[in-house]
């Protein structure tokens, strides 16, 4: 399945299924696939999560990888879209597979990785799993490689998100970040899924990411995965208000959904 194209002003094509991520309340999402010029079909509704989600605290918080101060906004990032129905993942280039990942993902989104290194026909990719910063090696013969000029950087101290293209800031947006008790984890991550919320209050789009909460092991039926999504609570924007997710104005997340392919670097610092 091809990677999401990087051209602007695209529309989403529905794929399937629902997942839950950490937000200021549980929410179910419908995954979207490659963006195209075709009109988006009506999203399939999923079962709404409980209005009082259950959160499970992590006894030993995981640590986020990477420096929290240096900006992670490369001029270009290699992304890898899995070609077949599965891809083997190894601990070392050329090593025996330690796990096999399915394509598309459980949510229905295509499996796309951010590449952090390459060696002799192998690509080291970021994985959406704990601990934060996990990577593995996949054979380049099993993926389609392309270049992504975009990156996004969230700064918790100012509650802002900077959009980079070719290593330069092209726009900046106010956001809501995690509270002191449930902070947004810092580190160098990537976007993994483009989703459409089916519950009220979470805006028109949400990205899943490779980041997981340092405080919550589970939330609302999900694994404590951090999302980047819209919100109907505009008063929270510019503050520390969430369980770890990054909230944006609905118009702003729509702009990003029309620009950013899966695999795009996503940093929180």
Image (tube, rainbow, N blue to C red):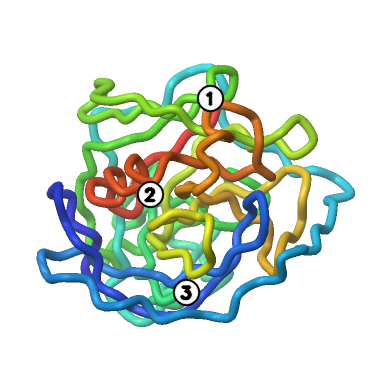
Residue 159: mark: 1
Q: Residues within 10 Å of mark 1 (few under 14, many from 20)?
A: some
How far is the residue under mark 1 from the one under mark 3?
Answer: 29 Å
Residue 112 occupies which quadrant of the picture?
Answer: bottom left
In percent of width and height, residue 5 lies at 18, 56
Question: For the point 66% across and 49% down, which residue is it?
Answer: 24
Residue at 56% x, 72% y: name it. 99
Q: On the rendered structure, is 256 left or right of 213?
A: left
Query: Which dot marks residue 114?
Result: 2
- Element at badge 1? loop
For label 3, the SS is loop
Vertical arrangement, residue 239 with respect to residue 113, above or below:
above
Query: In this figure, which residue is indicated by the disc labeled 3?
Result: 107
Q: Position of residue 107 (x, y in %)?
A: 47, 74
Residue plotted at (53% across, 25% down)? 159
Q: Is residue 58 left or right of residue 101?
A: right
């Amino acid at each position: 399945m091809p990677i999401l194209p990087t051209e602007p002003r695209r529309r989403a094509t529905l794929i399937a299924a629902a997942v839950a991520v950490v937000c200021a309340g549980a929410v179910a999402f419908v995954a979207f696939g490659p963006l195209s010029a075709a009109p988006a079909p009506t999203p399939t509704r999923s079962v709404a999560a409980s209005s009082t989600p259950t959160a499970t605290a992590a006894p030993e918080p995981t640590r986020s990888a990477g420096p929290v101060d240096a900006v992670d906004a490369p001029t270009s990032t290699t992304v890898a879209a899995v070609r077949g129905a599965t891809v083997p993942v190894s601990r070392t280039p050329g090593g025996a597979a330690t796990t096999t990942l399915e394509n598309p993902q459980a949510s229905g989104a295509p499996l796309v990785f951010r590449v952090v290194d390459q060696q002799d026909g192998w690509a080291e990719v970021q994985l959406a799993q704990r601990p934060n910063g996990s990577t593995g090696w996949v054979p380049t013969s099993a993926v389609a490689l392309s270049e992504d000029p975009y990156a996004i950087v969230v700064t918790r101290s100012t509650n802002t998100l900077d959009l980079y293209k070719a290593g330069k800031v092209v726009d900046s947006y106010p956001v809501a970040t995690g509270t002191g008790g449930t902070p947004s984890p810092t580190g160098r991550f990537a976007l993994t899924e483009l989703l459409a919320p089916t519950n009220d209050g979470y805006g028109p789009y949400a990205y899943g990411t490779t980041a997981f909460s340092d405080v919550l092991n589970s939330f609302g039926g999900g694994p404590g995965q951090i999302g980047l999504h819209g919100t109907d609570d505009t008063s929270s924007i510019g503050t520390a208000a969430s369980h770890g997710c990054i909230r944006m104005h609905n118009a702003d997340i729509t702009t990003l959904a029309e620009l950013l392919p899966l695999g795009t670097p996503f940093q929180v610092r």
